[in-house]
Amino acid sequence: MLAASIPLSRLRLLITLAVSQIFGWGLSFDLMGVFGRLMAHDLGMANELAFGGITVMMLIMGFSGPWSGRLIARHGASRILTCGSVTLGAGLVLLSQSTGPISFLGSWAVLGLGGTLGLSVPTYAAVVEREGADSKRLIGILMIFTGLSAAVCWPLAHAMEGWIGWRHSLLAGAALHLFVLAPLHRFGLPRANPAQSENNATSATAPLVLTASQEKRALLALTVISIGFSGLTFGLAPSLITLMQQSGADLSLAVQLASFRSVLGISARAMDVVAGKKASPLLSGFTGAGFMLLSLPILYFAQGSFLLMALFIGAYGIGSGLSAVSRTVLPLSFFSASRFAGISASLALPSNIANALSPVLITALLDYGGLPLVLSFALAVNLLVLAALFTLATLSRTSTALSN
């Protein structure tokens, strides 16, 4: 049904990028879910240091994000994605040969650079290059598949590790990046037509007419939303089991419900796609923030109740799924499609720093003040996000009124 409603070129674009992102994330960020403790043991490192590789990757992705935006604008997303696959493959080769903390973390730095060139920002830029301002639905569909990276790659990684060990499994992953994903990015994507893009009003013209001052306010609001939504998802998710235990759930219930969060997140993204133009990025943002705000008092008062725990994970899972879609496509509601790559790359800096540091911050708050302190912090962040969303809504109304 979905395939029948999408033209062939769009279906080709979607399939190519879905495959590349499932294995792009699955053979980088998600690797530690299977190999992390094995690597730590074999290399004689503490588990905390080994998992710090992910932090290195996310920080490199954050700080190099603005640079990737300039590269995309100059060379196009297809070439940058190809370079990303090659760099990710090189990072996996280096990681497979690591012998201690320095070479291990250095490999993750290379993977971070590969992620800058081969994961989210250039991927969504590739969609916008080809679809212009009408990219929201395709990006939403793509995010559904991207959310399946762990579900696809963890079983494969586990089977490969049992068969040939983690080092050779990493080399197999590198070969996939170099000999499958790199050519797929270079030759599998439908061509973007630069001349048509320059003359296309939906690509070159902003959806709203904003003054320089209003643009600054919009960018500041987008930055707050990007940091806040990232912190509320990446920060809270690793501690969900402990948070539910502190609210009275036993371990088995907490594990079962926490594992269901990603399914709800993907379902929320799917509902947003089905809603189509009826659900604007702003509406998705308000709805996502509202669900996450609702989840906080539910968890506080749950006291081990299965019903309340299920309501909490339902509200949080749906909220986190909608927030991911909203923060990705919100720039298209305020800036032209031709500026999407640069603005998204700039937002990647604070967002990826939040992704890297928020789990550590939440863990520290949990150890220091327990559930009440974490929920108070999450409440404050949520209110800041809602304030930023209201700022964007006000700018949208003001701009529309002036243009009329």
Image (tube, helix red, strand yellow):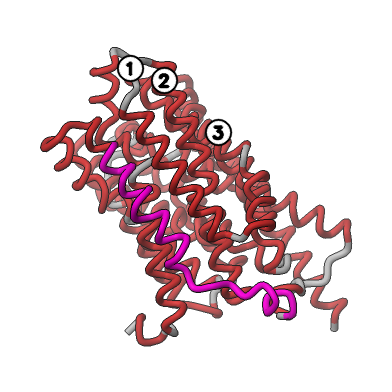
Is mark 3 in CB contact (under 8 Å) with mark 2?
Answer: no
Q: Is the N terminus in the top left, top right, bottom left or bottom right quadrant? A: bottom left
Give the residue number, with chain letter if any, for mark 3. 59
Q: Earlier in the sequence, mark 3 or mark 1?
A: 3
Specify the quadrant of the image occupied by residue 393.
bottom right
* In the image: residue 225, left or right of residue 402: left
- Residue at mark 3 to residue at mark 1: CA–CA distance: 23 Å
Image x and y of residue 205, in percent: 76, 74
Seen from the viewer's position, the closer of residues 260 and 81 is 81
Residue 202 belongs to magenta span: no
- Residue at mark 1 to residue at mark 2: CA–CA distance: 6 Å
The residue sitting at 23% across, 25% down in the picture is 38
Q: Nearer the viewer, mark 3 or mark 1?
A: 1
The image shows a total of numbered marks equal to: 3
Seen from the viewer's position, the closer of residues 385 and 9 is 9
Is mark 1 in CB contact (under 8 Å) with mark 2?
Answer: yes
Res. 315 in view: no
The residue sitting at 29% across, 35% down in the picture is 248
Q: Dot 3, how many residues are within 10 Å of its Cα: few (below 14), some (14-19), or many (20+)? A: many
SS for callout 3: helix
- Residue at mark 3 to residue at mark 2: CA–CA distance: 17 Å
Q: Which residues are magenta?
A: 171-199
Give the residue number, with chain letter if any, for mark 1. 99
Give the residue number, with chain letter if any, for mark 2. 103
The residue sitting at 55% across, 79% down in the picture is 277
Res. 322 in view: yes
Direction left: furthest residue:
163
Q: Nearer the viewer, mark 3 or mark 2?
A: 2
| Amino acid, disc 1 | Thr
Q: Is the C terminus in the top left, top right, bottom left or bottom right quadrant? A: bottom right
